[in-house]
Image (cartoon, rainbow, N blue to C red):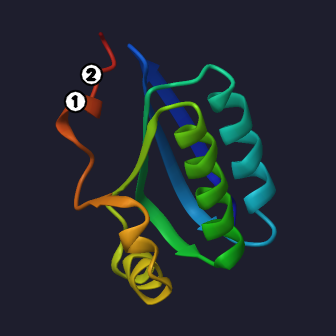
Amino acid sequence: MELKVSTRSHAGHALVAIAGEIDLYTAPRLQQEFTKLLQDGPKRVVIDMSLVEFCDSTGMNVLLSALKRVKEQGGQLDVAAPRPAVRKILQVTGLDSVFTVHDEVPGEFLISEGS
């Protein structure tokens, strides 16, 4: 399955919307997107996982790497709207206590396309 990643940045905040499956084959693409995004040093990154159907340990490692990098830059990285299967992986691995997990994308990240 293909992985789709789109990023919107606004006033030091970035929303990364991911769709598809994050696994051994698609994780490098996600890693590239984070590397590009984090060069600008956003203060807060929210990862919208509402359309992620599956995420394996490789994908979780990419998210952890991004979290570490954002924290090193003095920022914050949150995970938003994980589907039940992804939320279960976060819980089983204990990563739900490492990441701030929101049930939905925080309102300030719902930037209208016209703004």
* Amino acid type, mark 2: Ser
Q: Which residue has dot 2 on it?
A: 112
Residue located at (22% from left, 42% from top): 106
Where residue 36 appears, as percent x and y from the top left, is: 72, 30
Name which quarter of the figure residue 28 lies in. Answer: bottom right
- Mark 2 element type: loop
Find the residue positioned furthest to the left: 107
Instruction: State the quadrant of the C terminus.
Output: top left
Where residue 50 appears, as percent x and y from the top left, is: 37, 59
Residue located at (57% from left, 63% from top): 20
Density class for disc 1 (Cα within 10 Å; few <14, some 14-19, many ≥20) is few
Mark 2 and mark 1: span between their CA atoms? Answer: 10 Å
* Amino acid type, mark 1: Glu
Q: Nearer the observer, disc 2 or disc 1?
A: 1
Name which quarter of the figure residue 94 lies in. Answer: bottom left
Where residue 24 appears, as percent x and y from the top left, is: 79, 72
**Is residue 105 found left or right of 68 in the rendered image?**
left
- Examine the rendered structure and indicate whether residue 1 appears above or below residue 91: above
**Is residue 50 found left or right of 37 in the rendered image?**
left
Residue located at (22% from left, 61% from top): 103
- Mark 1 element type: helix
Where residue 110 appears, as percent x and y from the top left, is: 26, 32
**Is residue 45 found left or right of 111 in the rendered image?**
right
Residue located at (69% from left, 39% from top): 33
Q: Which residue has dot 1 on it?
A: 108
Name which quarter of the figure residue 1 lies in. Answer: bottom right
Depth check, front residue: 113 or 43 = 43
